[in-house]
Image (tube, helix red, strand yellow):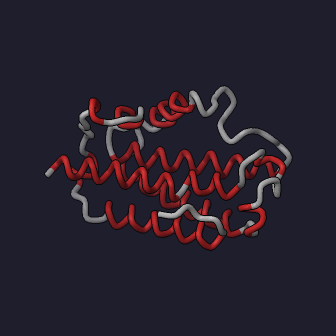
Amino acid sequence: MVRPTTKEELIKAADDGFDKIMALLEPLTPEERNGRFSFDLSKEKGAHWARDRNIKDVLVHLYEWHQLLLNWVEDNQQGRTHDFLPEGYNWRNYGEMNVKLRDKHDYTTYDQALNLFVESHKKVMALAQSFTNEQLFTKGALPWTSNSTLGSAFISSTSSHYDWAMKKIRKYLKGRK
Protein backbone atom coordinates (compact mmCIF):
# COMPACT_ATOMS: atom_id res chain seq x y z
CA MET A 1 0.00 0.00 0.00
CA VAL A 2 1.20 3.51 -0.81
CA ARG A 3 2.04 5.63 2.24
CA PRO A 4 -0.58 8.35 2.77
CA THR A 5 0.45 11.89 1.91
CA THR A 6 -2.84 13.68 2.61
CA LYS A 7 -5.29 13.83 5.48
CA GLU A 8 -7.91 12.06 3.38
CA GLU A 9 -5.52 9.22 2.52
CA LEU A 10 -4.39 8.94 6.16
CA ILE A 11 -7.97 8.61 7.42
CA LYS A 12 -8.89 6.12 4.72
CA ALA A 13 -5.80 3.96 5.25
CA ALA A 14 -6.32 3.88 9.01
CA ASP A 15 -10.03 3.12 8.79
CA ASP A 16 -9.50 0.49 6.09
CA GLY A 17 -6.81 -1.20 8.18
CA PHE A 18 -9.02 -1.09 11.26
CA ASP A 19 -11.92 -2.62 9.33
CA LYS A 20 -9.67 -5.40 8.01
CA ILE A 21 -8.45 -6.23 11.52
CA MET A 22 -12.02 -6.36 12.79
CA ALA A 23 -13.07 -8.59 9.86
CA LEU A 24 -10.11 -10.87 10.56
CA LEU A 25 -10.98 -11.19 14.26
CA GLU A 26 -14.76 -11.41 14.03
CA PRO A 27 -15.11 -15.06 12.92
CA LEU A 28 -12.48 -16.42 15.32
CA THR A 29 -13.42 -19.04 17.87
CA PRO A 30 -12.60 -18.41 21.53
CA GLU A 31 -9.77 -20.94 21.17
CA GLU A 32 -8.30 -19.03 18.21
CA ARG A 33 -8.73 -15.68 19.97
CA ASN A 34 -6.90 -16.90 23.05
CA GLY A 35 -4.44 -19.33 21.48
CA ARG A 36 -0.75 -18.96 22.10
CA PHE A 37 1.58 -17.89 19.29
CA SER A 38 4.22 -20.45 18.40
CA PHE A 39 6.26 -18.91 15.62
CA ASP A 40 9.50 -20.48 14.47
CA LEU A 41 11.73 -17.69 15.73
CA SER A 42 14.70 -18.89 13.71
CA LYS A 43 12.80 -17.83 10.57
CA GLU A 44 11.55 -14.47 11.83
CA LYS A 45 13.30 -11.11 12.05
CA GLY A 46 12.26 -8.64 14.70
CA ALA A 47 11.90 -8.90 18.47
CA HIS A 48 8.11 -8.67 18.24
CA TRP A 49 7.86 -12.27 17.01
CA ALA A 50 9.00 -13.46 20.43
CA ARG A 51 7.44 -10.59 22.42
CA ASP A 52 3.76 -11.05 21.64
CA ARG A 53 2.28 -14.24 23.02
CA ASN A 54 -1.23 -14.04 21.57
CA ILE A 55 -3.72 -11.83 19.74
CA LYS A 56 -4.50 -9.97 22.96
CA ASP A 57 -0.88 -8.84 23.16
CA VAL A 58 -1.11 -7.51 19.59
CA LEU A 59 -4.31 -5.61 20.40
CA VAL A 60 -2.90 -4.02 23.55
CA HIS A 61 0.23 -3.09 21.60
CA LEU A 62 -1.94 -1.21 19.10
CA TYR A 63 -3.91 0.40 21.94
CA GLU A 64 -0.76 1.50 23.78
CA TRP A 65 0.71 3.05 20.64
CA HIS A 66 -2.56 4.94 20.21
CA GLN A 67 -2.09 6.20 23.77
CA LEU A 68 1.45 7.31 23.00
CA LEU A 69 0.15 9.33 20.05
CA LEU A 70 -2.85 10.79 21.89
CA ASN A 71 -0.79 11.82 24.91
CA TRP A 72 2.05 13.21 22.82
CA VAL A 73 -0.27 15.39 20.77
CA GLU A 74 -2.31 16.57 23.76
CA ASP A 75 0.74 17.37 25.86
CA ASN A 76 2.47 19.27 23.07
CA GLN A 77 -0.68 21.22 22.25
CA GLN A 78 -0.83 22.22 25.93
CA GLY A 79 2.78 23.41 25.84
CA ARG A 80 4.22 20.36 27.63
CA THR A 81 6.77 19.64 24.92
CA HIS A 82 8.32 16.18 24.82
CA ASP A 83 9.31 13.52 22.35
CA PHE A 84 6.91 10.88 21.06
CA LEU A 85 8.54 8.08 23.05
CA PRO A 86 8.45 8.33 26.84
CA GLU A 87 11.49 9.56 28.72
CA GLY A 88 14.21 6.95 28.84
CA TYR A 89 13.34 5.47 25.46
CA ASN A 90 14.53 6.20 21.95
CA TRP A 91 14.27 4.52 18.57
CA ARG A 92 17.18 2.22 19.47
CA ASN A 93 15.69 0.85 22.70
CA TYR A 94 11.93 1.17 22.26
CA GLY A 95 11.68 -2.62 22.15
CA GLU A 96 12.16 -2.57 25.93
CA MET A 97 9.25 -0.15 26.20
CA ASN A 98 7.09 -2.46 24.10
CA VAL A 99 7.75 -5.33 26.52
CA LYS A 100 6.71 -3.12 29.45
CA LEU A 101 3.55 -2.09 27.60
CA ARG A 102 2.73 -5.75 27.03
CA ASP A 103 3.42 -6.72 30.64
CA LYS A 104 1.21 -3.88 31.86
CA HIS A 105 -1.69 -5.86 30.34
CA ASP A 106 -0.93 -9.31 31.73
CA TYR A 107 -4.40 -9.45 33.28
CA THR A 108 -6.26 -7.77 30.43
CA THR A 109 -8.59 -10.21 28.67
CA TYR A 110 -8.98 -10.54 24.92
CA ASP A 111 -12.40 -8.85 25.08
CA GLN A 112 -11.04 -5.97 27.15
CA ALA A 113 -8.10 -5.58 24.76
CA LEU A 114 -10.44 -5.51 21.77
CA ASN A 115 -12.62 -2.85 23.42
CA LEU A 116 -9.57 -0.74 24.30
CA PHE A 117 -8.35 -0.96 20.72
CA VAL A 118 -11.76 -0.07 19.23
CA GLU A 119 -12.21 2.95 21.50
CA SER A 120 -8.68 4.24 21.05
CA HIS A 121 -8.94 3.94 17.26
CA LYS A 122 -12.03 6.17 17.40
CA LYS A 123 -10.17 8.74 19.50
CA VAL A 124 -7.16 8.73 17.19
CA MET A 125 -9.38 9.20 14.14
CA ALA A 126 -11.25 12.07 15.79
CA LEU A 127 -7.93 13.70 16.63
CA ALA A 128 -6.65 13.27 13.07
CA GLN A 129 -9.83 14.91 11.79
CA SER A 130 -9.10 17.96 13.97
CA PHE A 131 -5.94 18.82 12.04
CA THR A 132 -5.60 20.39 8.63
CA ASN A 133 -3.79 18.70 5.79
CA GLU A 134 -0.97 21.24 6.19
CA GLN A 135 -0.63 20.55 9.93
CA LEU A 136 -0.46 16.82 9.24
CA PHE A 137 1.87 16.76 6.25
CA THR A 138 4.02 19.88 6.17
CA LYS A 139 7.37 19.62 7.94
CA GLY A 140 7.71 22.41 10.46
CA ALA A 141 3.98 23.19 10.54
CA LEU A 142 4.03 22.16 14.19
CA PRO A 143 7.32 22.90 15.95
CA TRP A 144 7.11 19.88 18.25
CA THR A 145 7.18 17.39 15.37
CA SER A 146 10.87 18.17 14.87
CA ASN A 147 12.11 17.09 11.44
CA SER A 148 9.12 14.85 10.74
CA THR A 149 5.40 15.45 10.24
CA LEU A 150 2.44 14.85 12.50
CA GLY A 151 0.91 12.72 9.76
CA SER A 152 3.89 10.40 9.96
CA ALA A 153 3.18 9.75 13.65
CA PHE A 154 -0.48 9.04 12.85
CA ILE A 155 0.48 6.64 10.06
CA SER A 156 2.97 4.83 12.28
CA SER A 157 0.39 4.43 15.05
CA THR A 158 -2.44 3.35 12.75
CA SER A 159 -2.20 1.99 9.21
CA SER A 160 1.44 0.87 9.39
CA HIS A 161 0.88 -0.79 12.74
CA TYR A 162 -2.38 -2.31 11.50
CA ASP A 163 -0.57 -3.90 8.54
CA TRP A 164 1.97 -5.38 10.98
CA ALA A 165 -0.80 -6.69 13.24
CA MET A 166 -2.69 -8.35 10.38
CA LYS A 167 0.47 -10.02 9.10
CA LYS A 168 1.16 -11.42 12.54
CA ILE A 169 -2.40 -12.60 13.19
CA ARG A 170 -2.66 -14.21 9.74
CA LYS A 171 0.62 -16.05 10.26
CA TYR A 172 -0.65 -17.33 13.62
CA LEU A 173 -3.97 -18.48 12.11
CA LYS A 174 -2.25 -20.14 9.16
CA GLY A 175 -0.05 -22.09 11.58
CA ARG A 176 -3.10 -23.40 13.43
CA LYS A 177 -4.59 -25.05 10.35
**Residue 144: horizontal and vertical position, in percent?**
80, 47
The residue lying at 37 percent from left, 55 percent from top is: 166
Nearest the camera: 123 or 20?
20
The residue lying at 61 percent from left, 60 percent from top is: 124
The residue lying at 20 percent from left, 52 percent from top is: 174
**Residue 165: horizontal and vertical position, in percent?**
40, 51
Q: How many marks?
A: 0
Examine the rendered structure and indicate whether residue 8 appears above or below residue 159: below
Left or right of 121 in this view: 110: left
Left or right of 170 in this view: 166: right
Examine the rendered structure and indicate whether residue 96 appears above or below residue 105: above
Nearest the camera: 110 or 167?
167
Q: Can I make out residue 114 in this image?
A: yes
Q: Can I make out residue 116 in this image?
A: no
The residue lying at 66 percent from left, 26 percent from top is: 88
Residue sitting farthest toward the front: 2
Q: Quadrant of residue 139?
A: bottom right
**Residue 26: horizontal and vertical position, in percent?**
31, 64
Q: Quadrant of residue 149?
A: bottom right
Q: Quadrant of residue 141?
A: bottom right
Examine the rendered structure and indicate whether residue 12 appears above or below residue 73: below
Nearest the camera: 151 or 100?
151
Left or right of 168 in this view: 155: right
